[in-house]
Image: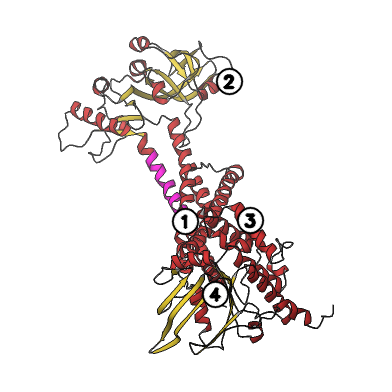
Amino acid sequence: MSKEIIKIQDLKREFTMGTETVYALRGISFTIEEGEFVTIMGSSGSGKSTMLNILGCLDQPTSGIYEIDGVSMKDLSRNELATIRNEKIGFIFQSYNLLARTSAIENVELPLLYNSKVSTEERRERAIKALEMVGLGERLHHTPSQLSGGQQQRVAIARSLVNNPVMILADEATGNLDTRTSYEIMSLFQELNKQGITITFVTHEPDIATFSSRTIVLKDGNIIQDYKNQNIQSAANELAKLPKEDH
Amino acid sequence: MRILNLLKIAYKAIVLNKVRTLLTMLGIIIGVASVIAMLAIGEGSKESIRSTISSMGSNMITIRPGTDDRGPARGSGGDVQTLTLDNYETIKEKSTLLSYSTPVVNGGGQVISGANNWPSTIYGVNPEYLDIKVVGLQSGSMFTDAEVKTASKVVILGQTVVDNVFPDGQDPVGQMIRFDNIPFKVIGVLEEKGENTFGQDQDDVVVAPYTTVQKRILAIDYLNQIMASAVSEDDAPEAVVEVTDILRAEHKLMDNEDDDFSVRSMEELIAAFSSTSEMLTVLLVAVAGISLLIGGIGIMNIMYVSVKERTKEIGLRMAVGGKGSDILFQFLIEAILISITGGLLGVILGLSATVFIEKFLHWPTSVAMYSIVISFAVCAVTGIFFGWYPAKKASALDPITALRYE
């Protein structure tokens, strides 16, 4: 049996808006094991974003249990949460969120700057390695404006890998990309997943879900579906099937 | 390690916004530069006044007979005969804070040598006069105490007298001159001192033993004044008090009676002159200080905009593990770096401006070390003070809101 990376039990999150209480999550339970590739799906208002914020330690649940790597996130201070984000989680955003006018390698180094255990030399080495993993070994010193959308997202993926997180958390990571590029990115995710990296992917595109090993569907703050994907598509194959672009 | 990383992050942010950073710095640069330049001008004029007065003997004390304000008509001090040689002896004997002292009698007259003559003033003093006035001889020698005792007819001449009485450039030492028809032997020439602060020619003097002047020229037995020098400049005010006490006892004045003499030190003169220039300095520095303050507000303004503009970046930094304190220090260090760099440039500009003022406007300047230290410290504090609020605001941002900020 493989290791549990994420354990969530009866997780609730309520917001008070004036006099009204909004129940964003109404008691959710699931576990994610090491090496899984999970997509979390749902329409807007389903609690997807709230789920993501909590998974990413940006927000605390109102009640319930949330454990990463066996460590309970309950009652951690802002600073402790920051450390967890730094050491356990790799973030990937829809809009890449790279620092402008800053080279790829410096962008990738960013999380390590906040980890005082990593020396300058090690930081550089790890950043180069991460960029090589995403196929950008040749573009270390390009700034975001000199890179295409797909390449920028690859830099962001390298940045999420650089601190050796237990889990990568992607928020609509292909939302800003065309089909071809998003398949390329998905095939990169699949490769990384094969190497044993746990990935949680929040999306509302059903075709993205077919590339993952498991799908959790949220609606109105509840899980309505949680299934293992029996027929995982290969993004590389799908990419090959796309009509050739005219260059 | 952590601080080093934060320094690196802040440095990058500054380099990425060169023009904006430079504009922000401008306020600080001008502020610091003007504080330094203004203080240099103020200090310079103060020092030039002080050095002029010092050349007259800054620890000099003069005792004059009664500033006579008792009668309906006020006489000039010199006419009153309350200062005697006995008074001088007593002061010399009892005072502890005086290093030199001399009785002084003086009178005007005509210096004649051959066909040349020149109106001048003769000062009857003792040999300590030279030490009190801080003046040496360019040739010849001073008369001795023995020559004072015997009322010898010897004189020392000032340069102006020499120039007018010996126009051919011959050596006056050893020559005979007449002062008011009394023959004197010239035994020395005073060093040139030029005009004093008040435009008075200090070289237009004839110096002779006071006994000679008293008996042979003025035919008086009182003194016009007593000159002395305090042990040091700092002791001068106390010496004034001491001499006053001695003289009051000597003149047997009651407690309710006013002094029938006056004791003045150069300190008072210096203070009077300095206060004007000091007021000017305060004014100039106040103006410069205001520009420094405005520079500080400029920093706050830019940092505030910078935080707003980089809200999303702050959110990202927090998402990848930046703590609130990391963000706080990043912005604080940025503000401090800006103000310190601005301060350094300001010091350089201020020093160059000072050199410029000295060279081209010929104003006396003197850069005070403390002005550099103070203005630099002020701008570091400005950086911290005005950088703190925006930085604190940045660090308190909620990571989720910051990330979603557009």
Residue extending farthest front = A1
Which chain letter goes with mark 1?
B
Q: Quadrant of residue B65?
A: top left
Left or right: residue A147 compared with residue B16: right
Q: Name the residue under label 2.
A: B167
Image: B126 above or below B280: above
Q: How crowded is mark 1: few (under 14 residues within 10 Å), some or many (20 or more)?
A: some
**Residue A26, placed above or below residue B187:** below
Number of callouts: 4
Q: Residue sitting at 78 percent across and 79 percent down?
A: A240
Nearer to us of marks 2 and 4 is 4
Chain letter for mark 3, please. A
Instruction: Say whether residue A200 is visible.
Output: yes
Please tell me if label 1 and label 4 are on a single chain.
Answer: yes
Q: What residue type is labelled 1?
A: Gly
Q: Looking at the magenta stretch, what is its main secondary structure?
A: helix
Disc 3 element: helix
Can you say whether B98 is above or below B29 in the image? above
Whole-angstrom CA distance, mark 4 to mark 3, is 26 Å
Q: Please check the rendered image and state whether residue B283 is part of the magenta-colored stretch, yes or no.
A: yes
Residue annotated with mark 4: B403
> What's under tag 2, amino acid-wise?
Pro
Q: What residue type is labelled 4?
A: Leu
**Both marks 2 and 1 on one chain:** yes
Which marked residue is nearer to the observer: mark 3 or mark 1? Answer: 3
Residue, x 69% and y 67% (percent of image)?
A134
Answer left or right for B168 relative to B241.
Answer: right
Q: Name the residue tied to disc 3.
A: A124
